[in-house]
Image: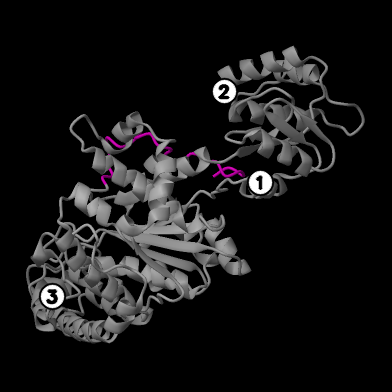
Amino acid sequence: MTGDDTPATDGGTDTEGADSLALDPWGSSTVSDYRKLFDEFGIESFEDVLADVPNPHYLMRRAIIFGHRDYRRVLDAMRAGEPFAALSGFMPTGDPHIGHKMVFDEIIWHQEQGGDAYALIADLEAHSARGLSWEEIDEHARDYLLSLLALGFDPEEGELYRQSTNRDVQDLAFELGIEANFSEFEGIYGFDGETDVSHMQSVVTQMADILYPQLDEPKPTVIPVGPDQDPHVRFARDLAARTRYFGVTEAYASFECDDAERALLARAYEALDTGEDTVRCVHAADWLDETDLPDADADALDAAVEKLRAAGKEPLRPRVRFLVRNADEDAFEALIDAVEGEKRVFEEHVDSFDMDREEAESLAREVEVENGGYGFRPPSSIYHRFMTGLTGGKMSSSIPASHISLLDDPEDGYDKVKAATTGGRTSAEEQRELGGEPDDCPVYELYAYLLAADDDAFAERVYEECRNGERLCGDCKEQAATLMREFLADHQEKRAEVEELLAESDIELESPRR
């Protein structure tokens, strides 16, 4: 991420790398090597920021949340006691299951850390992309909401809504649609001439969902998702940047240049600035021509030298540049007036010599919001691992045996765990001799993702006992099955207790479209 609010090399909206690792928000994506996501899509390792997380959730501590995109913005706000938000949506195509609980927990944890929490029912997406009737959507939506509340979401401090009845989201989606085009839908999602227009519209609605927490005020916002939803996050980041009135970047002369050229200008200036004589563009051109820079891109070097020579004796000086993107004349004039100190005004940008980049970004956003703009900050995201299905493969709502529904009878949950695939050996003797394989075991995942809850020592003990051959699969599954039965019984009791809380919330439980 660059210093301004323009998304950096985070995958943009192209699909480079997708041939070897495709991320499909509506498919059955699985990821066998999460490290590829770092290289191919610009996702960063969550381990890099874990030490800065106040009171990290056990999903973070156990590396189940494995990656992030620009999450430091959220952490900075969290630690400083400044506004931030968390949002995620749920497509009500079936019963909520234990895989969905991860996202529920992530939203609730951010709410507990002081964030504005949003949870939405993606009913427009379910209707357009999956063809569910409004009656089916209403039934499933209610179940998702009850489980969310039973797990601890506070509807008085947070917001629950459904896409189809939130007019602000729909209006924002319309505005964002102006910034999107069909070729992007083709490149990002593989849409073609057979794709329903309503499906495409639902994508823009999801972009509006992601940015919705910032309608009242721009603030860092995190979207907790599985990696298959990363295309949505990248697209939303791009659209957030496209709506901005002003861009902020560093510059050294009056002419425009790209990042590679700007880096060369910076090197020349640092080499020539002695604090005595004015550094001029022609001097920088000579230095670049005469200095061996084996790491420099040849095309960027030629372009930088050409631009510097054309500028001649113009002083080469560091400055912050405000670029006009979508600002009208009144907003541009307001920006000019707001920039204090030494400045130079051009037709489509303003150069400030007395501000640093952080100050400039804050000022640009302030002027934008005061003049009717959104001032969106690029949304951040955190990514959790896919939970393995009890039968192997990805956990799926459409395969009952692969998952445990939060609505399952506790005895059925017990039976499903008892019947689950394990990472054990072919015999007890071999297990004792070679140890189990907890890293490839759906049952161990139940402990790590759910059953051990906040008890890291318990989760670690199960792991080590399995790996060392002390824990046999039969006993392990019996313990897990018993804990699952207890969890389901407790959760369903809490669901009954929050029925009234849901009824009193603002969300419409029955769609007016029925």
Q: Which of 78 and 374 lies nearest the eye of the viewer?
A: 374
Q: Which mark is residue 361?
A: 1
Q: Amino acid under label 2? A: Asp
Residue 18 part of the magenta segment: yes
Q: Which residue is mark 3?
A: 417
Q: Compared with residue 75, is residue 178 higher up or lower down, i.e. above or below?
A: above
Query: x and y percent of residue 424 in the render?
Result: 14, 69
SS at circle 1: helix
Quadrant of the drawing holding the N terminus: top right
Identified at 40% across, 36% down, the residue is 13
Identified at 36% across, 75% down, the residue is 505
Query: x and y percent of residue 347 in the render?
Result: 70, 25
SS at circle 2: loop
Q: Which residue is mark 2?
A: 297
Residue 217 part of the magenta segment: no
The span shown in magenta is: 1-24
Tell me the quarter of the picture where residue 353 sits.
top right
